Image: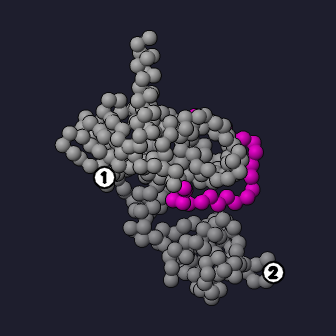
Amino acid sequence: MSAERLFKILNRLIDKNTCTAQELAEELEVSVRTIYRDIDTLTLSGVPLITTQGKGGGITLLDNHILNKTMLTSFEQDQIITALQGMQGATAHSNELILKLKNLFHKETSDWIEVSLNEWGMTNNYFEILKEAILKKQVVELTYWGTSGNKTVRKIKPAKLVFKGRGWYVQGYCLTRNDYRIFKLVRIEKIEVLDETFTEQLNPPSIESIDITHNKKVILSFDYRVQNRVVEEFDNNQIKYLENEIVVETSFPVDMWLKEYILSFGSAVRVIEPMQMKLEVEKEIKKMMKLINN
């Protein structure tokens, strides 16, 4: 018997209220007989299900349904609460849900983890706005700073929020480009939720499949006085500690964002490769010196 399958059945019934055994069997790729055995298991666990025969019948979850805590092991209960604690900074409703589950499971857990989606000094609530737009299938308009340094306004059908590397992204169908695009939350200047809605199910590609073939090898040399930042922002396998410098070999799109990122290290960084970026940084420094001397 699969506990995962039991939860899939329960989630489907919560979503649809009534399903036929045949529908569940096809969706979960098991026999109808297996579905009926699973229904018996759920019923014995305290889930109020009724089965009716004939046209319009099926398996129905009663309106007063509850999630019986006996369906979860103590370890699984801890995992659920821990996962929600890790998302406390991402949703406004997680604190209330954690409290309800702690009471249901009779758990006293320590608040050992906290997540905040805002950078220091930033107070925007874009995560919550986008989450609501995704659930309600509302089109949003983003004022967005791209990696090229250009500000654009995009209308998108938001599909999902993704955490990748060190940041949050929203994937959605861009009505300007007529294709799926991904936007980093910290580069969003403004979000407007429009009255326009959509009904289709969005299926964006996996974030792992996003094309990175335009990235180029980048080699940077850092002074040891910025070691803490280097350790935070690059993987260990990209870092080489030499006697008088720290050398990082990685890959990035060679664009305005990379130039500004390199300049953010001031005199503690030196570009080794690519030569194109080295010349761009030198050119920018000369412009800065000209402004300072005027």
Q: Which residues are magenta?
A: 189-211
- Residue 19 appearing in the image: yes
- Residue for point 55% across, 76% down: 5
Residue 92 x, y percent position in the rendering:
53, 45
Q: Which residue is mark 1?
A: 236
Q: Amino acid at mark 1?
A: Asn
- Residue for point 26% across, 43% down: 246
Q: Nearer the viewer, residue 252 or 202?
A: 252
Q: Nearer the viewer, residue 202 or 68?
A: 202
Q: Is residue 30 above or below residue 161?
A: below
Foreground mark, 2 or 1, reads 1
Q: Quadrant location of residue 281?
A: top left
- The residue sitting at the left extreme is 243
Q: Quadrant location of residue 209?
A: bottom right
In reply to whether residue 270 is colored magenta, the answer given is no
Residue 251 x, y percent position in the rendering:
42, 49
Residue 135 shown left or right of residue 71 in the figure? right
Q: Which mark is residue 135?
A: none
Q: Residues within 10 Å of mark 1 (few under 14, many from 20)?
A: few
- Residue for point 61% across, 78% down: 28
Q: Nearer the viewer, residue 96 or 115?
A: 115
- Residue 91 appearing in the image: no
Quarter of the figure that contains the C terminus = top left
Q: Which mark is residue 55?
A: 2
Q: Residues within 10 Å of mark 2 (few under 14, many from 20)?
A: few
Q: CA distance from mark 2 to mark 1?
A: 62 Å
Q: Amino acid at mark 2?
A: Lys
